[in-house]
Image: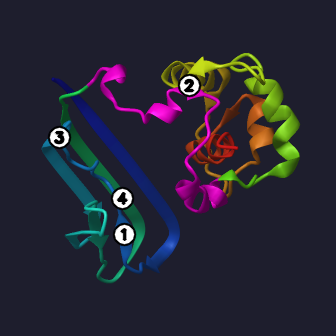
Amino acid sequence: MNRIGIIHETEYCYNQPVTFGPHRAMMRPSEGHDAHIAKARVNVEPKEVSWLRDVYDNSIAILTFDGKSDKLSIASEVDVDLYYDALNEWPISPYARSFPFQYPPEKHIDLMVYRLPSYPYDGPILQRWLRDLYQPGQVINTVELLSHLNTHIYRSFKYDSRDALGVQLPNETLTRGSGTCRDFAAFTGRIRA
């Protein structure tokens, strides 16, 4: 068993007091046979926090606010006990153990939306970035490919803290070699194709 700590802190400051609508926040990982939440703490200012579970059994914090404030602060700490920490213990469907693979026909409808390119013009620069990981026609162990991909992302990009609104395009993240967590999410979402 391994114990990991997840710490999240977000703070928004406003020029004047504002009114907040209700927020839904997911600040706890899902528990299961391989993960148990040993300790959790959430602080929100100004706040009223209540909890519910969605249809997927995720723990959802419902944040409601009384009055106005010029600051919104959310802090979460979770200690999670992991009982399966070896990558090879995670089951992979037999058809997906080597990449490339074909999904069974019954999964195609559900996956169709994820196979459409979000940023079709970014394809060439993304393919160049992926060239070190995978060559078309090559067969590779899927877990090994995912491990290489995670390492490649870690080595290729520098994290930036940025207050500006919006998300940069994936080609900007690739060209700059840096981005915020929002930019990384947009970029890694593009790799799915």
Q: Position of residue 170 (x, y in %)?
A: 75, 43
> Mark 2 belongs to which amino acid?
Ser
Dot 2 or dot 4: first in sequence order is: 4
Q: Residues within 10 Å of mark 3 (few under 14, many from 20)?
A: few
Disc 2 is placed on an element classified as strand
Q: Residues within 10 Å of mark 2 (few under 14, many from 20)?
A: some
Q: Nearer the viewer, mark 2 or mark 3?
A: 2
* Magenta residues (range): 85-114
* Residue 87 on the magenta segment: yes
Q: Nearer the viewer, mark 1 or mark 4?
A: 1
Taking the spot 49% from the left edge, 23% from the top edge, the residue there is 143
On-image quarter of the C terminus = top right
Taking the spot 85% from the left edge, 33% from the top edge, the residue there is 125
In the current view of this chain or complex, which residue is farthest to the left?
38
On-image quarter of the N terminus = top left
Q: Which mark is residue 73?
A: 4
